[in-house]
Amino acid sequence: MTTQQIDVGILGATGTVGQQFIRLLASHPWFRPAWLGASERSEGRAYSDACAWRLPVPLSDGIARMRVDACVPGAAPRLVFSGLDAAAAKDIEPAFAAAGHLVVSNARNFRMEPDVPLLIPEINGDHLALVECQQRARGWSGAIVTNPNCSTVVLSMVLAALRRFDIERVMVTTLQAISGAGYPGVASLDIVGNVVPFISGEEEKIESEPQKILGRLSGSMVTPHPMVISAQTTRVPVVDGHTEAISIGFARVPVIADLRSALETFRGAPQELGLPSAPVHPIAYLDRPERPQPRLDVDRGDGMTVSVGRLRECRVLHHKLVALGHNTVRGAAGAAILNAELMKARGLL
Ligand code: NAP
């Protein structure tokens, strides 16, 4: 689709999400990592010295030798992906946007700002119109575009597929992978053979982000979807893949066959446009009663497909199911790359 690759930067390139960016961009047809940024601990060092590479694919010599820069605007290309820690993203991302960079971010800081798109390209690509409002309101020549929390992505994909049945209430319990906490993350003595029933700040994000994502854009405003969500989050001894047990109450109660069909036929702009990171099936329905499982299903669609199973009636709300998504791919780096692909397709780069 394109002959010349676009140079991109990665803020937080040495972290868990940053490493996924490096892996996914290694063979990307449109984007080429040309600049890497991280903290002063890493600044000035070769990438292979600054980060302990922990993905089960080899690091290319070219990336291994790249020098890690400080996260200050200037030398980086116009498009930068961010896998920054929230404490660092707070000041660094707006500084880059003010300096003319398009920051495609994983961090939580700006997701709920009214003029910042909180994007899942299959659901709300039209929210990219907020970029212009953001630039006008803040006087930025760049912008910040965000992807949701890693559990929110999985939940929102399911809810978007079922929205035509008028969702009113949602209850979700998550079983979240250790990689969701970054590296070194949760202490092994806390997580091996154990379940930790608290992830700081996570329930609040899952209870508020999907309403913005499924919200209606009119002018420069997103009116949130009116559904109410109650979330309980747990950390479990799984390496990659967030599993979610979801119950949904509808205004118009559908039959199971219609729900299943809606899940299986769910498609969006990435599939229509044939974006490079778009999975053919954004949601895969698995028939076997013991699926989805993180170890078996997390890499479906190169980590971009949400796997769903166990659709059945719920005796409290109307229906319930189990969903699984790759937290550092569909829930982080892959999500941001798909966002940037949509931005390119819509002429925003
Ligand atoms: P991580 O492994 O702790 O990596 C954090 C990165 O930020 C590292 O590259 C680190 O560089 C850099 N950094 C920290 N402080 C900095 C500073 N003061 N200045 C510049 N760079 C700094 O974290 P992660 O799991 O990759 O998460 C990154 C972001 O993505 C977070 O905002 C997180 O909430 C979000 N997120 C994570 C997931 C997931 O599944 N892990 C999913 C969705 C969203 P050094 O190596 O030099 O310290």
Image (cartoon, helix red, strand yellow):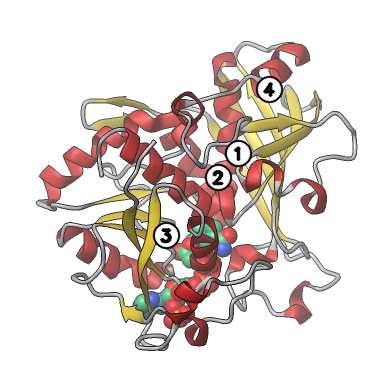
Q: Quadrant of the C terminus?
A: top left
Q: Is mark 2 within 8 Å of ligand 1?
A: no
Residue 155 is tagged as 1
Q: Residues within 10 Å of mark 4 (few under 14, many from 20)?
A: some
**Relative height, residue 157 to residue 304 (above, below):** above
Q: Quadrant of residue 94?
A: bottom left
The reply, left or right, for residue 322 in relation to residue 138 is: right
Task: Name the residue beneath numbered marker 4.
Answer: 264
Q: Position of residue 174 (x, y in %)?
A: 69, 50
Which of pointers 4 and 1 lies earlier in the amino acid sequence?
1
Task: Name the residue beneath numbered marker 2.
Answer: 152
Q: Are marks 1 and 2 in contact (CB under 8 Å)?
A: yes
Q: Between marks 3 and 2, how big is the CA–CA gap?
A: 13 Å
Q: Secondary structure at mark 2?
A: helix
Nearer the camera: disc 4 or disc 3: 4
Q: Between marks 1 and 2, how big is the CA–CA gap?
A: 5 Å
Identify the residue at image location x=53%, y=43%: 207
Residue 107 is tagged as 3
Q: Secondary structure at mark 3?
A: loop
